[in-house]
């Protein structure tokens, strides 16, 4: 089974900060990686697929990069709506999600 | 407009059975792989099971293999998850999702249905 490890698990940041979340796969998943945003009481929302393809309607301050085993999600300038938990998902072999990174207000 | 309406969740005793349903609309149901993903409180989502468009192929996570059965009724646009031998660790919100291929990101999530296993 492919394991996904995200870090940090919690991130404290201020409005306007540049934020980076890392996701590491236990073996190569090529570029078959997605990022989701989840707010309390809501279902996850897809932000990025295939490591770096921004879903239509997602603000351009979100970007994804990486391939193989190491991936990053970057928020270029943190906005109030961005305080949430973020998950990565590999879909190279079945599907595995990371344990999440909670972005909270500093 | 795509709709996925999950139902059947609730409080169940450890060891008991429960059947979840998901009624789909807004897309050609039998053309798509259907998947159950669950999310325990405070945890990341976990893939549970997937089924091919025809229903002829099914896959399960090791954590549920032998206890859960995924099925579909294409005449009713409905996906099912029959759960038996429920454990406390099966407590989660269960989502049904659809994709055009086996391995894909999940673009549309419904509200899910909450399963609570009491000990």
Image (spheres, helix red, strand yellow):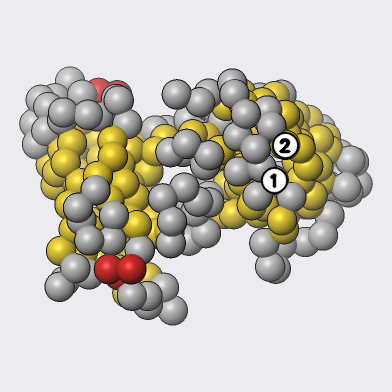
Labels 1 and 2 positioned on one and the same chain? yes
Q: Tell me whether the residue at label 1 lies in contact with that at label 2, contact meaning CB atoms closer than 8 angstroms.
A: yes
Crowding around mark 1 (Cα neighbors within 10 Å: few <14, some 14 to 19, many 20+) is many
Q: Residue at x 72, y 36 (%)?
A: A67
The chain letter for the residue carrying disc 1 is A
Measuring from the top left, give residue A66's x and y in whole percent: 76, 37
Q: Is residue B12 visible?
A: no
Q: Is residue A12 visible?
A: yes
In the image, taking residue A89 as reference, residue B59 lies left or right, namely: left
| Residue bearing the label numbered 1 | A51
Outermost residue toward the left in this view = B16
The chain letter for the residue carrying disc 2 is A
In the image, taking residue B55 as reference, residue B103 lies left or right, namely: right
Q: Name which quarter of the figure residue B110 lies in.
A: bottom left
Q: Nearer the viewer, residue A75 or B31?
A: B31
Choose the circle earlier in sequence order: 1 or 2. 1
Q: Which numbered disc, 1 or 2, marks the residue closer to the eye? A: 2
| Residue bearing the label numbered 2 | A67
Which dot marks residue A10?
A: none
Q: Is residue A5 above or below residue B108?
A: above
Q: Nearer the viewer, residue B110 or B105?
A: B105
Q: Residue at x 67, y 62 (%)?
A: A55
Q: Nearer the viewer, residue B70 or A86?
A: B70
In the image, taking residue B80 as reference, residue A57 lies left or right, namely: right
């Amino acid at each position: 089974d492919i394991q996904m490890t995200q870090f940090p698990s919690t991130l404290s940041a201020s409005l306007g900060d540049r934020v980076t979340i890392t996701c590491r796969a236990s073996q190569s998943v090529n570029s078959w990686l997605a990022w989701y945003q989840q707010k309390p009481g809501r279902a996850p929302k897809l932000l990025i697929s295939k490591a770096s393809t921004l879903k239509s309607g997602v603000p351009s301050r979100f970007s994804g990069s990486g391939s193989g085993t190491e991936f990053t999600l970057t928020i270029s300038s943190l906005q109030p709506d961005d305080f949430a938990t973020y998950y990565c998902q590999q879909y190279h072999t079945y599907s595995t999600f990371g344990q999440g990174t909670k972005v909270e207000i500093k | 407009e795509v709709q996925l309406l999950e139902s059947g969740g609730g409080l169940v005793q450890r060891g008991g059975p429960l059947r979840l349903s998901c009624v789909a609309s807004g897309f050609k149901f039998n053309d798509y792989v259907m998947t159950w993903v669950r999310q325990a409180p405070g945890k990341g989502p976990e893939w549970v099971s997937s089924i091919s468009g025809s229903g002829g192929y099914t896959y399960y996570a090791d954590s549920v293999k032998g206890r859960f059965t995924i099925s579909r009724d294409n005449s009713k646009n409905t996906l099912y998850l029959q759960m038996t031998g429920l454990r406390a660790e099966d407590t989660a919100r269960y989502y049904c999702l659809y994709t055009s291929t086996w391995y894909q990101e999940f673009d549309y999530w419904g509200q899910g249905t909450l399963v609570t296993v009491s000990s």
